[in-house]
Image: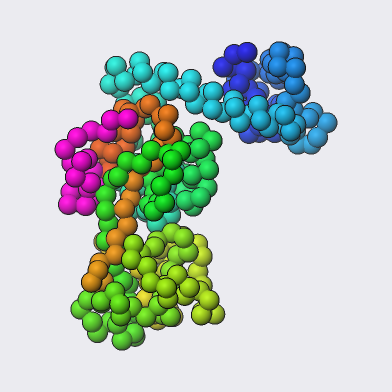
């Protein structure tokens, strides 16, 4: 069994077609078929059902593919030890990020990494549950998200703490207030992103507000939420980094929430066995150049990440 054979079976799993997988791997179909056949003989397991169209793994093959993904993940980890010694911005980062964070970090983060010609940054904008699933399966290397429940399978590296503000329709009575006490938020007028942004100080009315509304919005686009408020009145809750993206006219509709001011904590998450310390610090350094210093976690202001 070789690392190359594991790469080949994952290519077939991805493309579900021998010719396409061979092309992606830069080899002939006959070579690919031969290598897969040898692996199946060695393991005494049929990995793929070749009679199905498109090709799909057998039940036993699905388990082999899951393990192959993890084995390749650890093989790449070994390569990092030598790269760490050379301190080069070299390698590939598969990064997951949630929709309520991506618009405010990714444009400038790409600008930061683009000059690093030997670094490949591949970003997946996904919901939190899918990101966690992909991290655990080693389909992602790291993720940037806000998650309030600790997961023992993941290592959390706090990045920054961000205040949440209210974006209010000019036609709503909240607009006349310079700041809004948390206890006076009318949850029946709230447009919120389900599961994406939550108050650290949640009230029962907020948790159950969907039950009392005849219209809800369940995707993750903050700019669409703002437009919904503009057209339908009420208010929504936005992260502080969103405010500078609103434009001069809409910035007038922003109000601070007080007593208390709700926040969210944004962190980088990796698997507990992740060793690519150099790449984590590369992403952290990029974010430190984007987020205001006063929001950055105090430990990151002084020390690099140690895994």
Which quadrant of the rendered structure holds the C terminus?
top left
Instruction: Look at 40% across and 57% down and name the residue there.
Output: 100
Instruction: Look at 53% across and 23% down and name the residue there.
Output: 72
Give percent across and percent down for residue 41: 74, 14
Give percent across and percent down for residue 254: 27, 72
Which residue extends farthest right? 51
Determine which quarter of the picture holds residue 34: top right
Q: In this orientation, which residue lies closer to the viewer: 200 or 114?
A: 200
Give yes or no for residue 292 being in the magenta stretch: yes
Question: What is the magenta range?
Answer: 288-307
Give percent across and percent down for residue 235: 37, 76
User: In the rendered view, would you say 95 is above or below 262?
Assistant: above
Q: How many numbered discs? A: 0
Q: How is the image coloured?
A: rainbow
User: In the rendered view, would you say 218 is above or below 60?
Assistant: below
Which quadrant of the rendered structure holds the N terminus?
top right
The answer to whether residue 17 is visible is: no
Give yes or no for residue 87 being in the magenta stretch: no
Left or right of residue 2, residue 300 in this image = left
The answer to whether residue 286 is visible is: yes
Q: In this orientation, which residue lies closer to the viewer: 246 or 299?
A: 299
Instruction: Look at 19% across and 45% down and name the residue there.
Output: 298
Q: In this orientation, which residue lies closer to the viewer: 43 or 88?
A: 43
Left or right of residue 112, residue 298 in this image = left
Left or right of residue 207, residue 302 in this image = left
Give percent across and percent down for residue 171: 34, 85
Determine which quarter of the picture holds residue 196: bottom left
Determine which quarter of the picture holds residue 249: bottom left
Instruction: Look at 35% across and 15% down and name the residue there.
Output: 82
């Amino acid at each position: 069994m070789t690392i190359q054979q594991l790469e080949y079976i994952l290519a077939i799993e991805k493309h579900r077609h021998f010719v396409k997988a061979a092309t992606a791997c830069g080899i002939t179909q006959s070579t690919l078929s031969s290598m897969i056949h040898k692996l199946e003989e060695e393991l005494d397991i049929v990995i793929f059902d070749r009679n199905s169209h498109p090709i799909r793994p057998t039940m036993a093959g699905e388990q082999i593919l899951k393990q192959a993904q993890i084995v390749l993940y650890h093989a790449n980890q070994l390569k990092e030890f030598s790269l760490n010694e050379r301190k080069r911005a070299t390698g590939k980062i598969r990064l997951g990020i949630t929709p309520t964070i991506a618009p405010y970090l990714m444009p400038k983060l790409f600008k930061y990494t683009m000059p690093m010609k030997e670094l490949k940054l591949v970003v997946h904008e996904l919901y939190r549950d899918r990101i966690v699933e992909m991290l655990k399966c080693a389909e992602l290397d790291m993720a940037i998200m806000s998650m309030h429940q600790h997961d023992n399978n993941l290592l959390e590296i706090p990045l920054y703490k961000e205040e949440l503000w209210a974006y209010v329709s000019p036609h709503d009575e909240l607009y006349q207030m310079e700041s809004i006490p948390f206890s006076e938020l009318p949850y029946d007028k709230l447009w919120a992103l389900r599961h994406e942004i939550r108050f650290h100080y949640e009230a029962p009315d907020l948790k159950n507000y969907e039950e009392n509304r005849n219209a809800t919005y369940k995707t993750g686009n903050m700019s669409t939420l703002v437009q919904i408020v503009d057209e339908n009145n009420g208010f929504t809750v936005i992260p502080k980094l969103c405010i500078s993206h609103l434009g001069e006219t809409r910035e007038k509709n922003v109000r601070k929430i007080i007593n208390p001011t709700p926040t969210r904590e944004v962190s980088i998450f990796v698997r507990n066995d992740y060793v690519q310390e150099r790449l984590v610090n590369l992403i952290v350094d990029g974010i430190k150049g984007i987020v205001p210093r006063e929001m950055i976690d105090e430990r990151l202001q002084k020390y690099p990440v140690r895994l």
